[in-house]
Image (cartoon, rainbow, N blue to C red):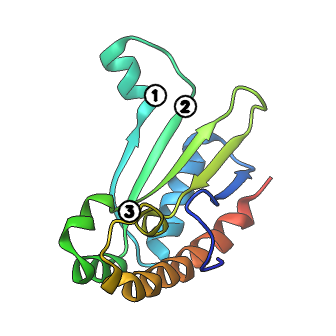
């Protein structure tokens, strides 16, 4: 990842597997890179269960890496609200493919200006660390690419 990239620059791919298998595989790839799974939330099931509305299959894989969390807390405990990291897996009705999409939480913290100027160097280091950790995950996810 480019350190100067903005949070709008995301990781995205499609995978050659069905939705449920993709959710499990993507979760496992995060865990193999030392991210801890906080939760897997199926938004489609939540919406159907509470609102009675049907949407395409969508799952949020919510993970946290201990080094990233520690670094964020050292900078400012208030930015912990931007953690953990989330990767979304969804079925697209437009193309029928299973998509995997990730936006960097640490880049969002940086891009929103949520830290004081004296913490910007520490945050830049955290963005770099996050990029390195996610590149490991993403390299492995790409092996499932369609």
Expressed as whole percent of the image width and height from the top left, the position of residue 32 reads: 48, 75
Tell which of 79 and 143 is nearer to you: 79
Callout 3 touching callout 1 (CB < 8 Å): no
Using the numbered discs, state the Cα–Cα distance from disc 2 to disc 3 in whole angstroms: 19 Å
**In the rendered image, which residue does mark 1 sit on?**
44
Expressed as whole percent of the image width and height from the top left, the position of residue 36 reads: 35, 69
Quarter assignment of residue 31: bottom left
Q: Residue at x 35, y 14 (%)?
A: 51
Using the numbered discs, state the Cα–Cα distance from disc 3 to disc 1 in whole angstroms: 19 Å
Expressed as whole percent of the image width and height from the top left, the position of residue 14 reads: 73, 50
Mark 2 lies on a secondary structure that is loop
Callout 2 touching callout 1 (CB < 8 Å): yes
Task: Inspect this view and state whether residue 17 appears.
Answer: yes
**In the rendered image, which residue does mark 3 sit on?**
63
In this view, 24 is above or below 132: above
Expressed as whole percent of the image width and height from the top left, the position of residue 50 reads: 30, 18
> In the drawing, does residue 120 fall left or right of residue 71?
right
Of labels 3 and 1, earlier in sequence is 1
Q: Residue at x 62, y 59 (%)?
A: 10
């Amino acid at each position: 990842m480019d350190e100067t990239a903005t949070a709008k620059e995301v990781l995205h791919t499609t995978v050659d597997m069905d939705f449920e298998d993709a959710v499990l595989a993507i979760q496992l790839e995060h865990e193999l890179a030392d991210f801890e799974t906080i939760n897997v939330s199926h938004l489609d099931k939540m919406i159907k269960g509470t609102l009675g509305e049907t949407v395409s299959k969508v799952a949020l894989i919510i993970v946290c890496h201990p080094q990233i969390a520690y670094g964020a807390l050292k900078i400012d405990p208030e930015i912990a609200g931007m953690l953990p990291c989330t990767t979304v897996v969804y079925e697209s009705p437009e193309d029928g493919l299973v998509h995997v999409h990730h936006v960097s939480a640490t880049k969002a913290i940086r891009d929103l200006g949520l830290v004081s100027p004296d913490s910007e160097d520490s945050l830049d280091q955290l963005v770099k660390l996050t990029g390195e950790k996610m590149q490991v995950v993403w390299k492995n996810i790409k092996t499932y690419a369609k």
